[in-house]
Image: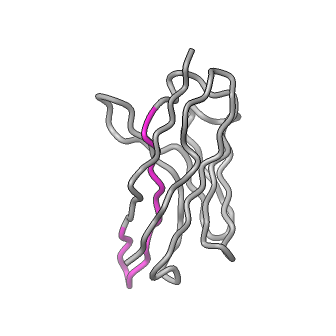
Amino acid sequence: QVQLVESGGGLVQAGGSLTLSCAASGSIFSIGTMGWYRQAPRKQRELVARITRGGNTNYADSVKGRFTVSRDNTKNTVYLQMNSLQPEDTAVYYCNADRIIGQSVVANFGQGTQVTVSS
């Protein structure tokens, strides 16, 4: 089992910045890729950004150049620096950690943190 606890969400004006953090605990030795997803009202959950243990990253096109994902493996923590926030970034942001169990990959998600961007 892996527990993921997010922090850092809140209300910000358009053009502002926020940094999300997610600390993992439990069976951390099994964690591979970590990242962030988001879900806006009446929309499906979508990938925002992911980062491998080695630091390789990938981003949704909508956030490239504005968001930066990073991780500190010594602290079992993943971060999401969000700049130039826009109202369309408003969503619940979920931390994700993929556990490698044998030949399988099991996705784990946190409880989510609300990000609201006002225009």
40 displayed left or right of 67: left
Query: In x, y percent, where is residue 74?
Result: 69, 77
Q: Identify the magenta region.
A: 91-106
Q: How is the image coloured?
A: one colour
Q: Is residue 105 above or below residue 42?
A: below
Q: Quadrant of the C terminus?
A: top right
Query: Quadrant where the N terminus lies?
Result: bottom left
View extreme (left): residue: 42
Residue visible at 55% across and 37% down? 10
| Image point (43%, 70%), residue name | 3
Instruction: Identify the image quadrant of residue 83.
Output: top right
Q: Quick one: which residue is furthest to the front in this view?
A: 11
Q: Quadrant of residue 78?
A: bottom right
User: How far across and down, in percent of the image, does residue 23 sit?
Assistant: 55, 66
Q: Is residue 10 left or right of residue 42?
A: right
In this orientation, which residue lies closer to the viewer: 103 or 75?
75
Q: 98 or 11, which lies in front?
A: 11
Left or right position of 85 against 36: right
Q: In the rendered view, tell whether residue 9 sits above or below residue 31.
A: above
Camera-side residue: 117 or 57? 117
Residue 40, x across and y down, in percent: 39, 32
Residue found at x 65% / y 45%: 19
Most common SS among magenta residues: strand
Image: 61 above or below 109: above
Is residue 107 depicted above or below 47 in this figure?
Answer: below
Residue 89 colored in magenta in the image: no
Residue at (64% x, 36% y) in the render: 64
